[in-house]
Image: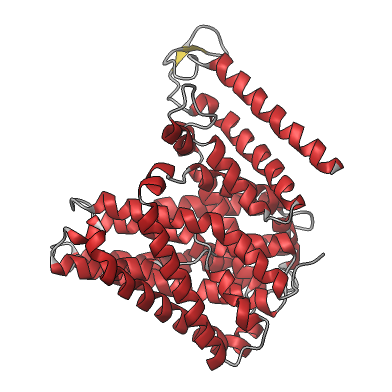
Amino acid sequence: MKRLLTLGPSLLLLLVAVSLLRAWTLGDAGQSLQPGILGDLPRAIPPGVATAALALGLLLLGSFLLGEILSLIGLPRVSGALLFGLLVGPQLHQWLSLPFPPLVEHAELRYLELIDALAVSLIGLVAGGEIRLQFLRRSMGVVLRLVATEAVGVVLWVGVGVSILGQWIPLLSERTSVERWFLTLVLAVMAVANSPAIVTAMLRETGANGIFARTALAVTVVKDLSLVILVSALLAAWSATASGGASIALEVAWHLSGSLLVGGVFAGLLGLAVFKTRGRLDLVVLVASFAIALAGRMLSIAPLLAGITAGFALANLAPLRSKRLFRSIDDLLPATYALFFAVAGARIGVDALSSLWPVVLALSTLRIAGIYSGLRIGCRWARVQPPMQRWIWTSMVPQAGVSIALISEVGKAFAGQPWVNQLLALLLSSVALHEIVGPPLLRLGLLRCDEVKR
């Protein structure tokens, strides 16, 4: 109770201070001419640049404080970061039509995209480092069976459910027969997506390192890597009739192989840094993560896949030498997770979620039913023992980074179609719901399997 009385006023004080700073600088941030530090030499300042650092500090400190408050009542810190981003972000502010400006604006979020990619790269390094080759050799049969049954279960439940309910969904009811079946398949496949970022964050937060934790992370990573290939193939099939079909296939191939190649290169560079450096490696990790993020933009690869590849290679090819590297990453993770999930919360489309909630709720129910039934069958097939057999499904509910990246690819593939905005709104609203309910469910599963460090 004493800690709560300290954290609550601190969070309130932070919000008041930022609000006063916003009011004081209002009208200055968007000015095109400002006096430079060398005198009256004018310089252009695009909207959002002058206050992006303020937004960064607010999201970082606020999400940390709210996460600590929620942890006192048994909820995940990740949920606190998501909730804080949602509360101070522009989406909720726009939906409520408040008369004052939001604490974090759209223009500022654009300048946080590179930091977002940095966090994804760092999360990939951690996720890859958690997957040990010895564990995969011993448990790959179990992992593959769980991946297969869960994916089939979700595709069947969502596919059949959407086919039956399609006449009440404007996105589907107004389409031709071919478009309706293809969109149904896209919705079903996209529902399979998971979130290595949330799973990794929850395992780090709770200190879980048992069979449930390792299996959940391995299933999540293997499934999402497979899903990237499957979704890319689906989108290439849609574009096959267009003249760019061949180029899209090549782009998909490079997206996958290039990510693995870049990850291997950074594994070698980080391994060399570990060998040559005796001190702490925090700065090395930050530079490498930024470099992976920049490579993702410049080379059209996936920073998450590159990070997973690099982390996996380091942890398994140089397990002793890489321990120092992963200890340095551990020190950076709390701030990284707080910022990453706060930015994700600020981007949750409250407007779309509020208008599409019946369809989103139906899709979510079908998805969770598919996850639960598919994993129950998979656990029996793989002879998984209780209590993991009963609770492993909770690790497959969260959605975040990979899902959003795939939705972006869907938007590019269907660009120009009159219904693309409806499809994107539905997919993003579904991800937003699972972003919110996923972390508490995963924590419940870890508690029931007795893998949370007290």
Q: Where 128 sits versus 384, above or below?
A: above
Answer with left or right where residue 320 lies relative to residue 164.
Answer: right
Task: Report the residue at 61% width, 20% height from top.
Answer: 21
Front residue of 35/435: it is 435
Q: Whole-percent x and y of residue 269?
A: 60, 62
Answer with left or right where residue 406 lies relative to residue 76.
Answer: left
* Residue 325 seen in the figure: no
* Residue 342 seen in the figure: yes
Quadrant position of the C terminus in the picture: bottom right
Q: Whole-percent x and y of residue 440?
A: 62, 60
Q: Residue furthest right?
A: 2
Q: Where 26 sits versus 175, above or below?
A: above
Q: How many marks?
A: 0
Task: Report the residue at 56% width, 17% height from top.
Answer: 23
Quadrant hosting residue 189: bottom left
Quadrant position of the N terminus in the picture: top right
Q: Whole-percent x and y of residue 194?
A: 49, 66
User: Coloring scheme of the render?
Assistant: secondary structure
Answer with left or right where residue 299 lies relative to residue 119.
Answer: left
Task: Report the residue at 44% width, 43% height from top.
Answer: 350
Front residue of 112/429: it is 429
